[in-house]
Image: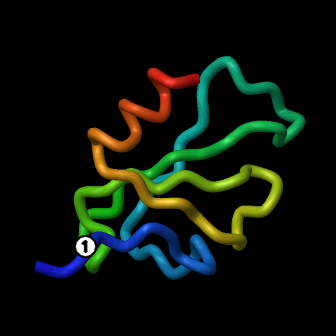
Amino acid sequence: MSALPRNVPASTELQDVRWLRSSYSTGANNCVETARPRSGPAAGLLAVRDSKNPAGPALLFSAAGWAGFVTTL
């Protein structure tokens, strides 16, 4: 079994995604955006990127990994 990908160098590499940001976010682009890739090696993971750099890298989390991250915060 291969390891899950942990990031992509450019979030634009993720196909068929809809990036979302919190309704609490202001228009200042000072937040993160999330997406759920539906295909490719990142399918089923949660992608997270910086809203100030939409073409930049994205981190990829499993559901358990994201829950652990948020709980730790």
Q: Residue at x 60, y 28 (%)?
A: 22
Amino acid at pointer 1? Ser
Q: Which residue is mark 1?
A: 39
Q: Is residue 64 above or below residue 73?
A: below
Q: Residues within 10 Å of mark 1 (few under 14, many from 20)?
A: few
For numbered disc 1, what is the local secondary structure?
loop
Q: Position of residue 5 (x, y in %)?
A: 37, 73
Quadrant of res 10: bottom right
Residue sitting nearer the eye, 70 or 41: 70
Q: Residue at x 48, y 34 (%)?
A: 69
Query: Exactly how many numbered labels are in the figure?
Result: 1
Q: Position of residue 6 (x, y in %)?
A: 44, 67
Viewed as shown, does residue 65 lie left or right of 13?
left
Q: Residue at x 28, y 78 (%)?
A: 41
Q: Is residue 34 above or below residue 70?
A: below
Q: Position of residue 55 (x, y in %)?
A: 70, 72
Q: Is residue 8 above or below residue 69?
A: below
Q: Position of residue 40 (x, y in %)?
A: 27, 79
Viewed as shown, does residue 38 lie left or right of 32?
left
Screen quadrant of the C terminus: top right
Q: Is residue 13 above or below residue 68?
A: below
